[in-house]
Amino acid sequence: MSTITEISEFLQKGKAKDVKALVQQALDDNEDPKAILNDGLLSGMSIIGEKFKNDEVFVPEVLVAARAMNAGLSILEPKLIEVGNEPVGRVVIGTVQGDLHDIGKNLVAMMLKGAGFEVVDIGVDVEPATFLEEAENNNADLICMSALLTTTMPNMEATISLLKEKGVRDKYIVMVGGAPVNESFAEEIGADYYTPDAATCAEVAKEAVLAK
Ligand code: B1M
């Protein structure tokens, strides 16, 4: 079994220490960090997601898998990030109110850092007013919102409505994403961009800031 396949297997079992060690081993063996991410960590998490959907595993198993994912990401992060000197812009990023999923949001934050952004990560379960306050206080160029639950997606719209209400909507580039979000939803709620994954989000964010 290859080290990358082992990473996926151990992640599914929630073995954080092993995942961490295997990611380090894969890096030492000069494996491509993107392959470690996509074919190891994300592949393992996607299998857990399928099993969760089919009631083959439950919240505790998903939680330990998520912990193992974060352990692997902590080793991988410096390899995925190569920051230039001048920040491209400043981003405030968070998972919307009612939503505790942070793995995707963390990946997006990581890729944005890698693209040269200064990233203010305001965590999970972020109320619309907090997005507004943090964006204003940090003089942000972009607001990035992540949602993983169909029930929390409307809180993206609530945040945009609040920005409009306070007359500051046009100050910010608003980007949305997360598994249940799509292009037409983004258009419907008045976001500037929807992107399907972390790498595309970072690319589009850079283009958007440079074009502004
Ligand atoms: Co949750 N969960 N979960 N969960 N969980 C999902 C999302 C679910 C699809 C599982 C399922 O049923 N198949 C389902 C949602 C169903 C729905 O709404 N339609 C679900 C549910 C129901 C729940 C609970 C309600 C379960 C319960 O308690 N009964 C509960 C809700 C808690 C809450 O938030 N209030 C819950 C809890 C949890 C855990 C805490 C156990 C854990 C989260 C741990 C953590 O994040 N620290 C968890 C997990 C891990 C998942 C799954 C298995 C994996 C999510 C993940 O991290 N994926 C997930 C099933 C799945 O997605 N297959 C599931 C890996 C991550 C890299 O992908 O976040 O999609 P993702 O990010 C992607 C893209 O979406 C994109 O970039 C990333 C890839 O590059 N992206 C953006 C994300 N944000 C972006 C922002 C952007 C651009 C791109 O621009 C700003």
Image (cartoon, rainbow, N blue to C red):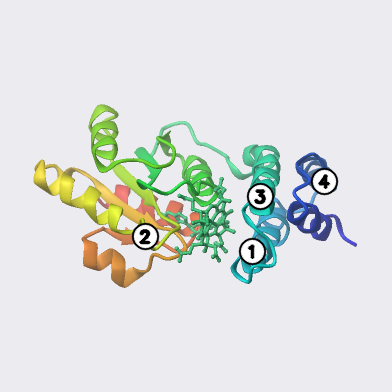
Amino acid at the residue labelled 4: Leu
Q: Residue 133, position in %: x, y?
A: 24, 32
Residue at x 58% of width, y 41% of height: 81
Label of residue 151 in the image? 2
Q: Is mark 3 on a helix, strand or loop?
A: helix
Q: Mark 2 vs ligand 1: CB under 8 Å?
A: yes
Which residue carries the number 3 mark?
60
Which residue carries the number 1 mark?
46
Q: What element carries label 2?
A: loop
State the separation of the CA atoms marked 3 and 1.
16 Å
Residue 184 can be seen in this image: yes
Q: Quadrant of the N terminus?
A: bottom right
State the separation of the CA atoms marked 2 and 1.
21 Å
- The image shows residue 172, relative to residue 51, as above or below, that is above
Frontmost residue, 82 versus 71: 71
Which comes before the other along the chain, label 4 or label 1?
4
Q: In which quarter of the image is residue 37?
A: bottom right
- Tag in front: 4 or 2: 2
Amino acid at the residue labelled 3: Pro
Amino acid at the residue labelled 2: Thr
Q: Mark 3 vs ligand 1: CB under 8 Å?
A: yes
